[in-house]
Image (spheres, rainbow, N blue to C red):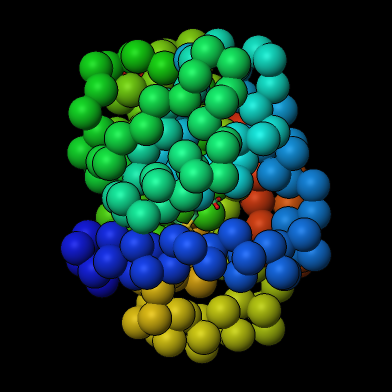
Amino acid sequence: MDLRQIGAVYDRRAATYDRTVGRGERWLVGDLREAFGAALRGRVLEVAVGSGLNLPYYPATVTEAVGVDLSHGMLRQVRSAGRADVAGGVHLARMDAQRLAFRDASFDTVALSLALCTVPDPVAALREVARVCRPDGRVVLLEHVRSPVAPVAWLQQGLSPLQERLIGCHLARETVATLVAEGFSVVSERQRRLGVFRLVVARPPTASG
Ligand SMILES: C[S@@+](CC[C@H](N)C(=O)[O-])C[C@H]1O[C@@H](n2cnc3c(N)ncnc32)[C@H](O)[C@@H]1O
């Protein structure tokens, strides 16, 4: 799917997103959203913020928050659900993760959840994440990835084409491996559901490589 199609899918899903995700999510990710929130600090950029499901978990250590997403509909949900009142405020903008309109090294934390499965070019998005994150900052990812358990991975691979056609979501991307290949250093990693769901805290690549 291209960016226009992804934006349109999420505009259509926006009003029901929380309900449909909410049904299975607790079982799937357990407490990883809370842990995702707890890892955020300072000036935070959440890329593909969606309807803002992570915002209630932002801790007091977040001094300012910026949320960007491709879908106007999802951003409207953030406002209408009253989730934009994090201390210091949440600034929202429509933006492509692959071309972030921020200066280099402008955030203490850059975070993404359930996003790199859908962004058409995850390598381009991770390069933008690396660029806008301070060199001493952190990157926090909550993503579903290809399971290390072979039968689960086969199932993901089999179901992925349908999911990609319906909502642009790839079920079996190896996002943590891509993160490492792009030079990020993994500081901690937790997983749920046979390694499908991962919470990763990482340092951005250093300029010297
Ligand atoms: C599965 S939802 C996840 C939303 C939210 N992060 C969450 O955890 O509930 C995927 C989100 O990624 C956004 N998205 C997909 N591709 C994007 C891109 N290239 N740039 C910005 N947002 C994008 C979609 O609009 C959608 O809101």
Query: Which image quadrant for residue 35?
Result: top right
Q: Position of residue 45 (x, y in %)?
A: 44, 27
Residue 24, placed above or below residue 186: below
Q: Toward which corner of the image does residue 58 lie, by quadrant?
A: top right
From the viewer's side, name the closer residue of 11 and 157.
11
Residue 135 coordinates in the image, percent (x, y) = 42, 14
Up the image or down, 187 lies above or below 126; here it is: above
- The answer to whether 92 is drawn above or below residue 65 in the figure is below
Is 200 located above or below residue 30 in the figure? above
Residue 197, image x, y percentages: 66, 57
Q: x%, y% of residue 102?
A: 25, 23
The residue that appears at 72% across and 69% down in the rendered structure is 24
Q: Quadrant of the N terminus?
A: bottom left
Question: In the image, what residue occupies the spot 47% across and 39% down?
Answer: 79
- Whether residue 173 appears in this view of the structure is no
Q: Which residue is located at x 56 percent, y 37 percent? A: 82
Work out whether residue 5 can be spotted. yes
Q: Residue at x 58, y 84 (%)?
A: 154
Q: How many marks?
A: 0
Which corner quadrant holds the C terminus?
top left
**Does residue 145 appear to the left or right of 37 in the view shown?**
left
Relative to 204, 33 lies left or right: right
Res. 145 image quadrant = bottom right
- Camera-side residue of 8 and 134: 8
- Say which of 12 and 188 sits in front: 12
